[in-house]
């Protein structure tokens, strides 16, 4: 049986972020057919909780970007491993 969520939009956005790399705030809003204003408080909450990281991650990125903390750690590990192989 599925558990009821206390805040389903937070859970939905967090789950979506875990399956995507760095993203702009408008991306989950578009995915779920919501306005960015509806998603911004959810993103801010996930950043406060440490589940998302706010920053500039993509080369040539434009504006604010977010990434799931675990996804970002995995990307860093892979990047470092690739750099080590090159040396």
Image: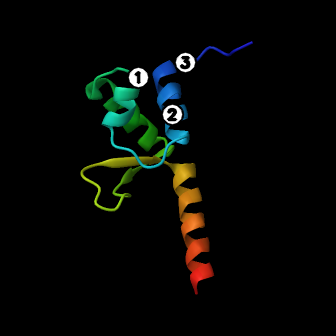
Query: How dense is the environment of label 1, judged by Cα within 10 Å: few (below 14), some, or many (20 and up)?
Result: few
Select label 1 or label 3 by which is in front.
Answer: 1
The reply, left or right, for residue 69 in relation to residue 2 is left
Instruction: Return the residue at label 2.
Output: 16
Report if the CB atoms under discs 1 and 2 are less than 8 Å apart.
Answer: yes
Q: Is residue 43 above or below residue 35?
A: below
Residue 8 image position (x, y, % from top left):
51, 19
| Residue pictured at 55% horizontal, 51% vertical | 71
Residue placed most toward the observer, 33 or 12: 33
| Residue pictured at 24% horizontal, 52% vertical | 62
Q: Between disc 1 and disc 3, whose residue precedes?
A: 3
Select label 3 or label 2 by which is in front.
Answer: 2
Q: Between disc 1 and disc 2, whose residue precedes?
A: 2
Residue 53 image position (x, y, % from top left):
43, 50
Report if the CB atoms under discs 1 and 3 are less than 8 Å apart.
Answer: no
Instruction: Return the residue at label 1.
Output: 32
Instruction: Return the residue at label 3.
Output: 6
| Residue pictured at 28% horizontal, 60% vertical | 60
Q: Secondary structure at mark 1?
A: loop
Query: How dense is the environment of label 2, judged by Cα within 10 Å: few (below 14), some, or many (20 and up)?
Result: some
Q: Between disc 3 and disc 2, whose residue precedes?
A: 3
Residue 23 image position (x, y, % from top left):
39, 45
Q: Secondary structure at mark 3?
A: loop
| Residue pictured at 59% horizontal, 65% vertical | 78
Name the image quarter holding the C terminus: bottom right
Name the image quarter holding the N terminus: top right
The reply, left or right, for residue 51 in relation to residue 64 is right
Residue 68 image position (x, y, % from top left):
50, 46
Residue 42, label in figure: none
Which residue lies most toward the bottom here? 87
């Amino acid at each position: 049986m599925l558990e009821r969520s206390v805040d389903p939009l937070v859970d939905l956005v967090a789950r979506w972020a875990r399956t995507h790399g760095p993203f702009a705030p408008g991306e989950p809003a578009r995915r779920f057919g919501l306005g960015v204003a509806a998603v911004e408080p959810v993103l801010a909450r996930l950043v406060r909780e440490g589940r998302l990281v706010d920053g500039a991650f993509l080369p040539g990125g434009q504006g604010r970007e977010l990434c799931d903390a675990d996804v970002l750690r995995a990307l860093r590990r892979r990047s470092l491993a690739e750099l080590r192989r090159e040396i």
